[in-house]
Image: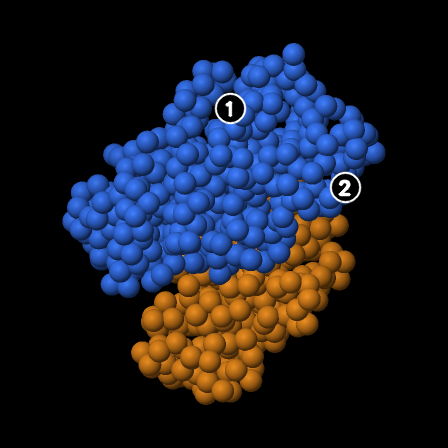
Chain colours: A orange, B blue
Amino acid sequence: MGWRVQVVGGGVIGLACAWELSRNGHEVTVVAPAPGRDGASWVAAGMLAPVTEAHFGESALTALLVEGAGHWPAFAAALEAASGLAIGYDTAGTVTVALDASDRASLDDLLAYQHSLGLEASRRSASECRRLVPALSPALRGGLEVPGDHQVDNRALLGALRQACGEGGVTFVEGRVTAVENGPALVLDDGRRSASDRIVLAAGTGLPSIDGLAAAGLPPLRPVKGHILRLGPPDATSPVPLLARTVRGLVHGRSVYLVPRPDGSVVVGATVEERGTDTAVRAGAVYELLCDARTIVPAVDELELLEAATGLRPATPDNTPRIGWTALDGVLAAVGHYRNGILLAPLTAAAVAALVGRRPVAPLIASLAPA
Amino acid sequence: MGWRVQVVGGGVIGLACAWELSRNGHEVTVVAPAPGRDGASWVAAGMLAPVTEAHFGESALTALLVEGAGHWPAFAAALEAASGLAIGYDTAGTVTVALDASDRASLDDLLAYQHSLGLEASRRSASECRRLVPALSPALRGGLEVPGDHQVDNRALLGALRQACGEGGVTFVEGRVTAVENGPALVLDDGRRSASDRIVLAAGTGLPSIDGLAAAGLPPLRPVKGHILRLGPPDATSPVPLLARTVRGLVHGRSVYLVPRPDGSVVVGATVEERGTDTAVRAGAVYELLCDARTIVPAVDELELLEAATGLRPATPDNTPRIGWTALDGVLAAVGHYRNGILLAPLTAAAVAALVGRRPVAPLIASLAPA
């Protein structure tokens, strides 16, 4: 027997939860302004990077990211089978390079930290890096090889999730939720009110504008702006794609990444900016991304600039998501995934489905409960 | 009594000629794929710059540009009156700045050349430049003040020309001309054939794809690619526009310009690239423009990136336009305006109208005859 569940949010978290809940026999409705098209998921690069996203002082989060990565192979296979669509899940691995001596020292510190957490990463000389990625600049100080950091085509992923949801009987309501009320029920901006047995909050940075959540026990969410570029493949005469694996770089202390797609295009990201809800594409951020990308991969200059965009990542004060029951009856949260929404979507969906189905969850998941 | 005249091309040259011919009593038709919207005119920055566009070895061309600038005040007034539209004609003048000592030396050489041609320009220290343009970087080596280089909003200009043409009874045919035949007549890509008394060729880089012109006596035209950026105004809270006059710069030998518009936006251009008919927006060119623009005006970083575009300028081997009768009966050319199409549009239109009306033209114009 299933519940009537309403999912608020049509990004990767909302759609993954909806699909998983539908597979668990629930009657699911997704409410979002543009399911599968808006929010940070659409703008993302699709990196699945527990290792290169490991930051000092966030070892608990890193453990969660590693756990989340473990869900991906089965999730990707099931989703491609259910949707009949390819999602560009690519396990070729990642190379992180350093531009100057200071960047090299930072990478060495990071490598020691990664090893202290039991993560797999190897120091590589400049020439070893260039053997892995021939397009790299000759002027680099070597780097790290990280075989466990992968990627998925985030837009293909969203399309496949939407398709799989449809196949699974999920209903989509295009609209903006203005309030959560007892019931639990949703109120939409056109005045409609819809009750259900359960509600899953997965609205990303849209959450703070929803009324009725003051007593939910959720931490404050702040939007963290990111600029990202999509660059087109070189001219059709080019014999091979520019990159065959994800390249990250430290460029005079600034982080940049280049994520190749099967069609030869490259996603370059991403700035990390605390600017409130500003979503303007700024000249300075575009400059910074282009500058750093072409510094580590000079042939970037010849790529076509297809898109410059921004997204707002939803972040909690400790940069760790909250997944679990809120203090409101029947209302679950799956929020605050910050830079790791794509990576953590399968884990989050599985956790939400377990909680809705009253199945036990692992202590790692239980520790994320908001209330 | 008027002639039936067909104008091939809907850029600034074609529209200015059409409007002027209609004012001279002719029955005018403009044939172009998207009159007023396509071609180099739409992408341009709208600088009216006889002085800062003066290049060594092109003194004859500079004389033409100065003559062309002289047409602008009356042309702008007449066009705004005829169309009822503002065109952003702005005579605030231009400042050209130098980044390093070598750039400073280049500007001094240029100043001496400008003075040798009798052009008005003055050497300015860095602090004098910053008094004229407070947004300039403190790290510049001074520059030149050029009061006679002005600007117009090229897109507003095209809109006003189109409106004035309509008011003047000009007919627009949206289509691509594939051939010019005896008559003279035009053949369109949909097979239509239309005869007239006179034809004016103003098709820019589209000219080489028109059949039947081998015996016209026109020089070869090559496309010269230019990248340009349009940057949005800073946040609405900003008290004043970033720039109140056009700023040009030499940045380690590379030229860049920033042209402010009345709404606070800024046009940044332009690369000069010989790449055939490639019109892709390339990451490297966008990087270069942003890099040079923010080097001389650091606050560029905060502007919104509204548009990155390319255009193809039509250039003759000597970079000088050809205006006059071709070797084909009844066929006039107004082609090859390269970087100076906006500046030379009024002069060109007046010359074409005089030639069609069998009035004498000045020796300077007569020297531009193609055949």
Q: Quadrant of the N terminus of chain B?
A: top right
Q: CA distance from mark 1 to mark 2?
A: 32 Å
Residue B73, position in %: x, y? 38, 25
Number of numbered callouts drawn: 2
**Category of crowding for the residue at label 1, using alpha-carbon neighbours closer than 10 angstroms: few (below 14), some (14–19), many (at least 20):** many
Q: Residue at x 47, y 47 (%)?
A: B228
**Category of crowding for the residue at label 2, using alpha-carbon neighbours closer than 10 angstroms: few (below 14), some (14–19), many (at least 20):** some
Looking at the rendered structure, the secondary structure element under dot 1 is: helix
**Label 1–label 2 contact, CB within 8 A:** no
Question: Above or below — where is A362 with respect to A326?
Answer: below
Q: Please name the residue that numbered disc 2 is placed on.
A: B212
- Chain for disc number 1: B
* Residue type marked 1: Ala
Residue A267 visible to an observer of this rendering? yes
Q: Of the residues under marks 1 and 2, which one precedes in the sequence?
A: 1
Residue B175 visible to an observer of this rendering? no
Q: Residue at x 50, y 71 (%)?
A: A297
Question: Above or below — where is B46 with respect to A288?
Answer: above
- Chain for disc number 2: B
* Residue nearest the observer in this picture, B55 or A225: B55
Residue B197, position in %: x, y? 72, 23
Q: Please name the residue that numbered disc 1 is placed on.
A: B160
Question: Above or below — where is A356 with respect to A246?
Answer: above
- Residue B129 located left or right of residue B6: left
